[in-house]
Image (spheres, rainbow, N blue to C red):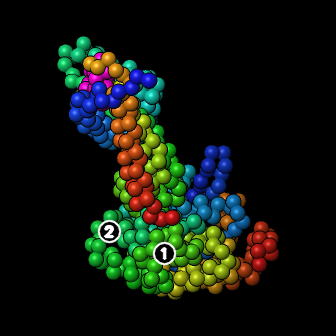
Amino acid sequence: MIKVENLYKQFGENEVLKNISTHIDSGEVVSIIGPSGSGKSTFLRCLNMLETPSQGKVWVNNQEITDKKTNIMKVREQIGMVFQHFYLFPHLTVLENLTYAPMKVKGESRESAEKKARELLAKVGLSEKETAYPNNLSGGQKQRVAIARALAMEPKLMLFDEPTSALDPEMVKEVLNVMKDLAQSGMTMAIVTHEMGFAREVSDRIMFLDEGKLLEEGSPNEFFNNPRTTRAKDFLEKVL
Amino acid sequence: MNLDFSQIVPYIPFILKGIWVTLKFVIIAIIFGFLLGTILSLFKISSNKALNWIGKVYTSIFRGTPLILQLMLIYFAIPQLTGYDIQPFLASILAFGLNSAAYVSEIIRAGIQAVDKGQTEAAQALGVPYRLMMKDIILPQAFKNILPALMNEFVTLTKESALVSTIGYLDLMRRAQVVGADTYRNFEPLIFVGLIYWLMIMVLTTMGRIVERRMKFSD
């Protein structure tokens, strides 16, 4: 589904990603963890070209998105993204947030877009909120709407950029539950997270980034029980 | 005190006709300035250097010189250059519209840049093309924030419109002067049109408040 080859990213002098090569298979759930400033979010954002890599190549569905000739907008339709700070459209109702892109980008009819949106809202447990505006929702509700909004485009892949980091503690679970359901439905997911318990439970694979390098990759069991690098050991000791 | 408003009573219909004469060009100038200002603001935030430059130079010229000078240039200098005998009405629209666009473009630019960058990213991540994103996502949010500043600009334009009396356009202000010259009384007609200007601004302000309240969708 995704292949990354020798990916580098620099912001001015600052080298944020250093020579990352990896892949994510179809149906796989991958959690990307590591200390703050390790480049996790930047890595994730390179997968849909919200950041342009300085060097290296990224393929999504066998299409090289780092190629300038690729129409990145078309590729992004297949990649859902969920942000730490939700970024719902505040001037649209919850339902309109979900139907906007399917109607305007994919040209779906209002009828079918709304039908699908209502199904998704039911799935994330927010059916009664369809006429509400985002600013009247709690953080957890906003994030569930944001997930539903991304799913409304029927993506083949979902990217999550610290989806629970901006939430009050008691709202983390409702969002993680939605993500768990999604993982079980077979969705391909890449998740940047600090929720170690969640990462351990739902991931097929863990990527550990430190100072822009992909230091370790492996199954949750391997990684959490027997980290190979001292960096990962130190990190796990601090967070677990 | 030598005040006698009854002296101007015969002239009231003449003065009142000036309301529409003023409004006619003010409304067109506001719309023209607003549309041009929106386009210029998009130039200013564009990644295209040439467009950036056009936006900047435009603003520096029209904000950096007196409005009355621009008005006179358009009204008196265009005929000299081109031989085209420009009418006061058209000259007024051009001068006020072009001038207002410079200010409006700055207001809108600031409004667009104040919209959370995450909104752009969310739209991009959904595959929404730039044009649609601007039209449906960014600009509606920007306009909500800049409405008070925009209203301010419209109020200023409406009041400054009195400058067109200097090129002989028979607007409210000019009519007050004509009546003053006719009756040898200046205080009464000036106070009278002053009141009319004030009322027009009050109506405009109220309209602005109504729009503002309507747009308070999300708070």
Asked whether the viewer can see residue B124, the reply is: no
- The answer to whether residue B47 is above or below residue B126 is above
Q: Is residue B20 magenta?
A: no
Give the magenta part as a residue range.
Answer: B168-181
Residue A1 picture location, percent across and down: 47, 72
Crowding at mark 1 (Cα within 10 Å: few <14, some 14-19, many 20+): many
The numbered dot on residue A145 is 1
The percent coordinates of residue B161 (x first, y second) are 35, 31
Q: Quadrant of residue B199?
A: top left
Which residue is nearer to you in this view: A182 or A174?
A: A174
Number of dots carrying numbers: 2
Amino acid of disc 1: Val
Please give the residue where the numbered disc 2 appears in the rendered image. A103
First-in-chain label (1 vs 2): 2
Q: Seen in the image, is B13 located left or right of residue A28?
A: left
Chain for numbered disc 2? A
Give the residue displayed 47% in from the left and 44% down from the top.
B149
Q: Main secondary structure of the magenta part?
A: helix
> In this view of the protein, can residue A45 be seen by the observer?
yes
Does residue B32 sit above or below B141 in this rendering? above
